[in-house]
């Protein structure tokens, strides 16, 4: 046997060792074989190979693709949109870095919430006075305080903070849903290749500006133009924000559409 044959055989053996059967993958991810077969049927997650026994096997590339699918599903995207996002964002590392930044942010928020609830339980059990400031740590939106204050002033942050804290739970829920729907609309537009200066993108830009305008402290008049330009750049530069728009390509559409809006309408 030639050395090249040995090397080729060794490579194939390693590839097979790195594979997971459909049953193994279902157990690892907490999903079902039926779901994975459905992903295959719609072209979202084809197996790396199908064995002589008809079983599907998934190698490293397929595993990375599935990880991205599950992350995007957690963001609320539907399967057709997930397929578009993954197929258009070819740089896997860049896409995963954006997801990782978002996960770190959520991890920090969850850690703070756990500590807040634990403090409430301890206070109740010990008959101690409850401190509202401690009870709701991690439930607010203060993670961007320094960035907002540095870019647009402390007054802008304080006004928005008072507005958020003054909301009822139902109002916050409604605002969160409105934000999610706007992000999904931008993501869908980007995946369809909508041009920033198109009527559709400019309608979304107008909707985005109205969404921003509802927050007290948002600049008005002449200051709004610079605000939109800076905000658009931030969406692209910071993966925590770009994740809201399906990744870098979505954030770039938002940035360019807001820039066109600012230059032609303000």
Image: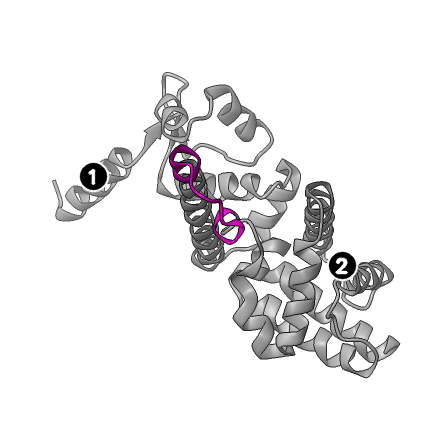
Residue 25's image quarter? top left
Question: Does residue 247 appear in this view?
Answer: no
Dot 1 alpha-carbon crowd within 10 angstroms: few under 14, some 14 to 19, many 20 or more:
few
The reply to whether the magenta stretch includes residue 126 is yes
Q: Main secondary structure of the magenta part?
A: helix
Residue in front for this viewpoint, 147 or 244? 147
Residue at the spot of label 2: 194
Q: Residue 115 in the image: x percent, y percent?
A: 40, 45
Question: Does residue 24 appear in this view?
Answer: yes
Q: Is residue 193 above or below residue 152?
A: above
- Residue found at x 18% / y 43%: 5
Judged by depth in the image, the label closer to the viewer, 2 or 1, is 2
Report the disc number at residue 131.
none
Quadrant, the N terminus: top left
Q: Is residue 233 left or right of residue 171?
A: left
**Residues in magenta?**
122-135
Q: Disc 2 versus disc 1: distance between alpha carbons?
A: 47 Å
Quadrant, the C terminus: bottom right
- Residue found at x 43% / y 57%: 93
- Residue found at x 58% / y 61%: 241
Q: Is residue 170 left or right of residue 30?
A: right
Q: Is residue 96 above or below residue 14?
A: below
Q: Is residue 67 left or right of residue 76?
A: left
The reply to whether the magenta stretch includes residue 265 is no
Q: Secondary structure at mark 2?
A: loop
Residue at the spot of label 1: 9
Q: Residue 116 in the image: x percent, y percent?
A: 45, 45
């Amino acid at each position: 046997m030639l050395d090249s044959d040995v090397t080729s055989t060794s490579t194939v053996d390693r590839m097979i060792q790195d594979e997971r059967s459909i049953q193994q993958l279902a157990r690892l991810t907490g999903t079902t074989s039926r779901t994975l077969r459905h992903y295959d049927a719609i072209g979202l997650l084809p197996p790396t190979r199908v064995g002589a026994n008809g079983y599907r096997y998934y190698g490293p590339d397929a595993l990375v693709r599935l990880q991205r699918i599950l992350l995007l599903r957690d963001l609320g995207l539907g399967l057709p949109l997930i397929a578009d996002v993954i197929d258009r964002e070819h740089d896997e590392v860049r896409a995963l870095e954006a997801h990782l930044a978002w996960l770190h942010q959520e991890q920090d928020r969850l850690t703070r919430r756990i500590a807040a609830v634990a403090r409430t339980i301890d206070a109740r059990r010990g008959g101690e006075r409850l401190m509202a400031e401690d009870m709701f740590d991690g439930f607010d939106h203060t993670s961007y305080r320094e960035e907002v204050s540095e870019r647009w002033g402390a007054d802008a942050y304080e006004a928005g903070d008072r507005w958020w804290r003054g909301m009822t739970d139902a109002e916050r829920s409604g605002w969160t849903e409105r934000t999610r729907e706007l992000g999904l609309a931008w993501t869908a537009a980007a995946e369809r290749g909508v041009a920033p200066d198109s009527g559709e993108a400019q309608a979304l830009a107008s909707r985005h500006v109205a969404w921003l305008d509802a927050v007290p402290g948002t600049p008005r008049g002449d200051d709004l133009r610079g605000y939109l330009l800076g905000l658009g750049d931030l969406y692209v530069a910071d993966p925590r924000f770009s994740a809201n728009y399906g990744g870098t390509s979505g954030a770039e559409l938002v940035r360019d559409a807001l820039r066109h809006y600012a230059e032609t309408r303000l």
